[in-house]
Image (cartoon, helix red, strand yellow):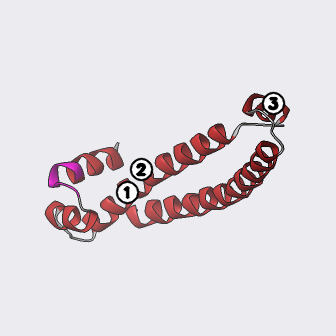
Amino acid sequence: MAEDAFLEALTVLETVLADNADRAKLIKRRIARLRASRAKGMLYTESVISEDGPLIVQLVTDSATELDTCGAEVRRTEAQALHDEGLTMAQIAERFGVTRQRVSTLLRQARA
């Protein structure tokens, strides 16, 4: 049932948002350390080499990728749920702020 798929996608979204909140805290700590290092006259290369774990840019990329992937699934399953409940592709398109053709593609992807 489409509603179940949509609720499942929302559950995954909640998890991704929680992961991104943790990642955002780590990014903020790294930014603070980088600013402190620069205030002491350290070069960026010295600061980056001394970092443990992924760089800020990697953390941002990971967050964006997860949200994009999860968001796509939410869009597909929500479009399918709304369509299953009787909304036309044009009505869904208006609510999503996309074309009717885009909604058609979302519905095809949701069924696949």
Horizontal side of 8 relative to 97 (left or right) equals right
Part of the protein shown in magenta:
98-102
Amino acid carrying label 3: it is Glu
Amino acid carrying label 1: it is Arg
Circles 2, 3 touching at the beta carbon (< 8 Å): no
Residue 100 falls within the magenta-colored stretch: yes
- In the displayed structure, would residue 34 be above or below residue 89? above
Q: Could you say whether the residue bearing mark 2 is in a helix, strand or loop? A: helix
Which image quarter is the N terminus in? bottom left
Relative image position of residue 38 (x, y in whole percent) = 77, 43
- In the displayed structure, would residue 76 be above or below residue 3? above
Circles 2, 1 touching at the beta carbon (< 8 Å): yes
How far is the residue under mark 1 from the one under mark 3? 43 Å
Secondary structure mostly taken by the magenta-highlighted segment of the chain: helix
Horizontal side of 10 relative to 62 (left or right) equals left
- Residue found at x 29% / y 67%: 82
How far is the residue under mark 2 from the one under mark 3? 38 Å
| Crowd class of label 1 (few under 14; some 14 to 19; many from 20; radius 10 Å) | some
Relative image position of residue 23 (x, y in whole percent) = 70, 52
Which residue is at the front of the view, 18 or 92?
A: 18
Residue 59 falls within the magenta-colored stretch: no
Q: Quadrant of residue 12?
A: bottom right
Q: Earlier in the sequence, mark 2 or mark 3?
A: 3
Relative image position of residue 92 (x, y in whole percent) = 23, 65
Residue with the mark numbered 1: 75
| Crowd class of label 3 (few under 14; some 14 to 19; many from 20; radius 10 Å) | few
Amino acid carrying label 2: it is Ala
Residue with the mark numbered 2: 72
Q: Could you say whether the residue bearing mark 1 is in a helix, strand or loop? A: helix
Residue with the mark numbered 3: 46
